[in-house]
Amino acid sequence: MKNLFIITAWILSGTVYSQIIVGDAIGTAPINNKSSVLLEFANTNNKGILLPYVRQKTSIPTEGSIILDVTDPTNARIKFFNNTPSTTDHWTDLSGQGADVSFYLNSQPTMSQITEDSNARSIIGANFTTVNDGVLVLESSTKALVLPVVSDVNNIPSPSPGMMVFVNKTGTKRLAVFNGSKWSFWKP
């Protein structure tokens, strides 16, 4: 019976395309703009999305990847891979400054402690993807991720390193990333 349920869920997941809202049934995107949303979050005003802590960057990452680079835990930075030759390693630093996240890594398993399944991934928006690496792959040519929205990063009581939100304050709309010690803001 359990196997039948799993197989049925797997088949349905491949044939059903829908928007996913994490946290509630409403989300933050206006009702008349839901058709362009692939994944969005509840309007809690005090939570964000956490980026993966990456101890060893892959040699050929996928364009659009955003990570908390902890290859040097005392100088952790949020980075975006855009594959442009303007940077030495094709990664753009979104933090602007490093943070010491060694304390947080003490509770994270090391590569020698886990066996990573290189084929493990979740795909939202399509049956398959051409992306070679990534735990969560958003695959759509017409839909996008809506970041968790906050009116002020100070509403987040204890942000975790690698947190990302969209600040929607009157006169100030920004992407905000937290590297473990400071928030950095990116203007559209």
Image (cartoon, helix red, strand yellow):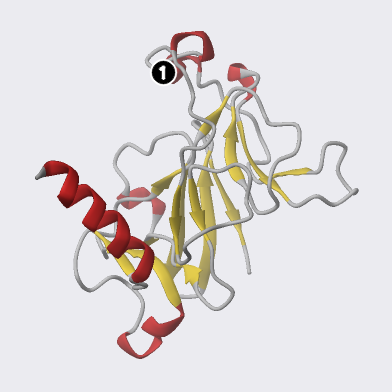
Q: Is residue 150 above or below residue 136?
A: below
**Across the whole image, how many numbered discs are drawn on residues?**
1
Give percent across and percent down for residue 164: 47, 49
Identify the residue shown where x is 35% and y is 91%. Answer: 32
Camera-side residue of 99 and 118: 118
Q: Is residue 27 above or below residue 119?
A: below
Identify the residue shown where x is 40% and y is 52%. Answer: 153
Instruction: Check disc 1 and give the amino acid type.
Output: Gln
Identify the residue shown where x is 55% and y is 78%. Answer: 142
Residue 134 visible from this viewpoint: yes
Residue 151 visible from this viewpoint: no
Camera-side residue of 43 and 129: 129
Identify the residue shown where x is 83% and y is 37%. Answer: 89
Give percent across and percent down for residue 52: 49, 36
Is 104 on the left-hand or right-hand side of 172? Answer: left
Quadrant housing the N terminus:
top left
Camera-side residue of 65 and 103: 65
Residue 152, by quadrant, is: bottom left
Is 89 on the left-hand or right-hand side of 36? Answer: right
Give percent across and percent down for residue 126: 48, 65
Is 70 on the left-hand or right-hand side of 13? Answer: right
SS for dot 1: loop
Instruction: From the image, tell me which residue sits under label 1.
Output: 108
Quadrant housing the C terminus:
bottom right
Give percent across and percent down for residue 155: 31, 51
Mark 1 Cα shell of 10 Å, populated few (<14), some (14-19), many (≥20): few
> Which residue is at the far left?
1
> Which residue is at the far top?
112
Is 82 on the left-hand or right-hand side of 105? Answer: right
